[in-house]
Amino acid sequence: MLDPELLERITARRAELDELEERLAKELAEVRAERPSWNRYAASWSDSSIAAGCGNSPTAGSPRACD
């Protein structure tokens, strides 16, 4: 049989993990709800800015090309 102290620690840890799971599920739902707005934002970028090499990629065109 398990030590009562160990059983108490396991029970407390499970409660902590259940609370964390609830918080993470809520945050994930919020992120998923925001995602469509990010897609609209990305779609609003003009093709000309991408063609000019504007972007945050280290391989994108000259950093001065978008100034």
Image (cartoon, rainbow, N blue to C red):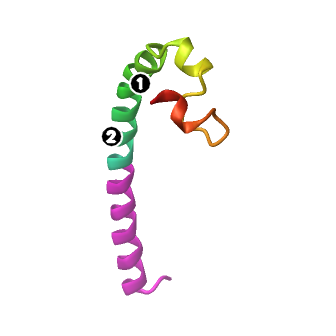
Upstream in the sequence, badge 2 or badge 1?
Answer: 2
Q: In the picture shown, does residue 34 fall above or below 44?
A: below
Quadrant of res 17: bottom left
Instruction: Give the camera-side residue of 23 and 11.
Output: 23
| 2 versus 45 height, above or below | below
Quarter of the image holding residue 5?
A: bottom left
Badge number at residue 38: 1
Question: What's the residue at 63%, 34% (across, down)?
Answer: 60
Residue type (three-letter) at the residue carrying disc 1: Trp
Return the mark for residue 26.
Answer: 2
Residue range highlighted in magenta? 1-21
Which residue occupies 39% across, 50% down?
21
Q: Is residue 48 above or below residue 14?
A: above
Instruction: Pick whichever, 32 or 5, lies toward us.
Output: 32
Please name the residue shown 46% across and 19% down the image: 39
Q: Main secondary structure of the magenta part?
A: helix
Q: Residues within 10 Å of mark 1 (few under 14, many from 20)?
A: few
Q: Secondary structure at mark 2?
A: helix
Looking at the image, residue 52 sits to the left or right of residue 12; the answer is: right
Task: Give percent across and percent down for residue 29.
Answer: 37, 33
Q: Does residue 37 appear to the left or right of 53 in the view shown? A: left
Residue at x-position 38% and y-position 47%? 24
Q: As rendered, which of 56 and 10 lies closer to the eye?
A: 56
Q: Amino acid at mark 2?
A: Lys
Q: Is residue 26 left or right of residue 49?
A: left
- The answer to which of 60 and 3 lies nearer the viewer is 60
In reply to whether residue 4 is colored magenta, the answer given is: yes
